[in-house]
Image (cartoon, coloured by chain):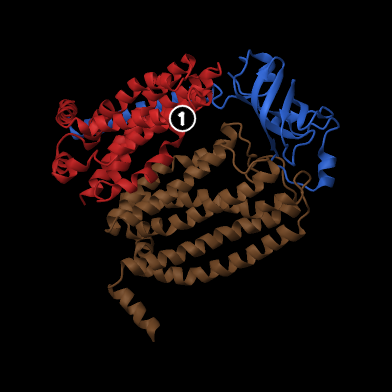
Chain colours: A brown, B red, C blue
Amino acid sequence: MSSWTWFHRLASPPSFYRLADRLAPWLGWLSLALLAYGWINGLFFAPEDYQQKDAYRIIYVHVPAAALSLSLYVGMAVAGFVALVWRMKLAESALIAIAPVGASFTALALVTGMLWGKPMWGAYWVWDARLTSELVLLFLYLGVIGLWQAFEDPRAAARACALLAVVGVINVPIVKYSVDWWNSLHQGSTILKMGKPSITAAMAYPLFASLIGSYLFAGYVVLHRLQNELLLREGGTAWVRELMGKSRV
Amino acid sequence: MSAVLAILTRELRLALRSRMDWLLPLLFFVMVVLLFGLGARPNDPVLAGFAPSILWVGALLSMLLTLDRLFRADYEDGTLEQLCLAEAPLGLTVAAKLAAHWLLTGLPLVLLAAPLAVALQLPAAGLPALVWGLALGTPVLSFVGGFAAALTVALPRAGLLLPLLVLPLLAPVLIFGAGAVRAALGGLDAAAPLYFLAAVLVLCLTLVPWAAAAALRNAFE
Amino acid sequence: MTKRQKRMAAVLLLLVGLSVAAVLGFTAFSKNMMYFQTPSDIAAGQLPEGARIRLGGLVEKGSVQRGDGLVVNFSVADCDANLPVRYEGILPDLFREGQGVVAMGHMEGKTFVADEVLAKHDENYMPPELAEKLTTPDGKHSCAQFKSMGG
């Protein structure tokens, strides 16, 4: 049993709130530094591409946004699964803290992809497996948000959203592997490709920096949203009152 | 098994007593499809090209109309709570209810599709793919719709939320259902998208009853 | 049935359902669900006249010829075969010889008539100097980009 105490402590809202308070500034500053390095280098100093000239530079926004849209959905579904099986309040709050952040990154991935597609492919939008499944992903996020808003009781809302999120997770591998399964217009994966490197170092380092920076930024935003969600749901409990009393001084 | 049969006959008997509940969505389907015919130029060949999507979207919309009531009446009069407590597994009960829903709303659409397709001047080459596609796809509409209806059964104004929940999950069914007809029209083999629809159908039959049962239990906690 | 038997039955049903769905899904995927064809697919099989398909391949070096107005004739090749294509319209910026394209259209005799041409770029990013070094003499540095569908 003793090995689980850390887990129970983490799952209790007050201790998680305090942990998030300590963690969030680190994530925020680190992400700011990485994004500044990645975007300034990527947009101004990285060499231009042999095919796409300067237009390829949108990958410094598009790739992190697209990666996050999938990762956050998986995170949301895992939180949903935990909420369904172990009835953990923290997971319920995490689920709804993630949803709007994931929806924003999905929308950003779609918009930047369209802006990239027009000059390169010749069309803003193609009804292609990758693009369609990413659009479905956006609707799944919106469905979770809409379902959450419709309920009055937060616990019932969280469980309904959790079910929807878990069912919708079937779309994630479809988005990820659509370019391999169907001969998609969308190019294949660059970073996760095995074998010979397909991006030169001067382009890759800013890409990795902006990728990690974006993940940290998403973590920062989710932590803050989760803290607010906890305060809202636990309002009136002793620890929230204590916290509010302290901050008022 | 007897519980499943009992639910099925109960649903069908209830439907016989309130015929309007399932006749109106059918009428809606017919009218939507015919309105496209009326709105287009007379004998416009372009219409035939759109016929697969019109029929599929019509089926999707008419199914949406029936979703809100799928579990609502049973929820309000307490039947659903009894079913949740009953000995028969709730997943099987839900599967029986959804099967009845398909028999009443999906199967008539499949039967009506061929004459309506002819009215939209869809060439005969596309008819088998259309009817097969709808026969495999409409149960998916019932089952996925049933899951969304179960999620929102406790909500008073679920009608507005249902399309948002259902349509993205059903987008692939529509894409491949209409795609099969277009392939058949072009003289290509329509088997691949139909196999895909069959795979989705079996997946739904296997997984949706349990997910919907969990969603219904959630409504009583 | 005891509780244990019920659980076994449920698990069995689940496994049967999932495996049947998997078999059907693989059958669908092995049958070219997106109607995507490479020039060698078209050379090998009988494609009905007028069927709308997606053609993918590389624009062959030296094959692009501008006709009257916006008409462009070019030839699309994969590793083994090539196919003449006619298109009327504005081509995307990235369209050039040796570059991947995906074209929607149908066969008319021996020619593929495209109504939409989209340029596909690969997943490689590198500065022009490096690309020159890596390119093979015939310009086909990525014909594996378009794989032919089996079955």
Tell me the residue at 17%/34% (across/down).
B88
Label 1 sits on residue: B53
With B218 as the anchor, is C112 left or right in this view? right
**Image location of residue B200, percent across then percent down:** 41, 30
Q: Is residue A226 above or below residue C108?
A: below
**Residue A6 placed where, x, y %?**
38, 62
Quadrant (top left/top right/bottom left/bottom right) for the C terminus of chain C: top right
Looking at this view, is A8 or B188 the one in front? B188
Chain under callout 1: B
Do we see residue C100 in this rendering?
yes
What residue is drawn where x is 63% and y is 63%? A35
Q: Please tell me how crowded label 1 is: few (under 14), some (14-19), or many (20+) other residues with Cα within 10 Å.
A: some
Circle 1 SS class: helix
Residue type of the residue flagged with mark 1 = Ser
Give the image location of residue A3, x and y in percent. Answer: 37, 59
Q: Residue at x 39, y 24 (%)?
A: B134
Is C52 drawn above or below residue A40 in the view shown?
above
- Observer-nearest residue: A217 or B181? B181
**A96 above or below C144?**
below
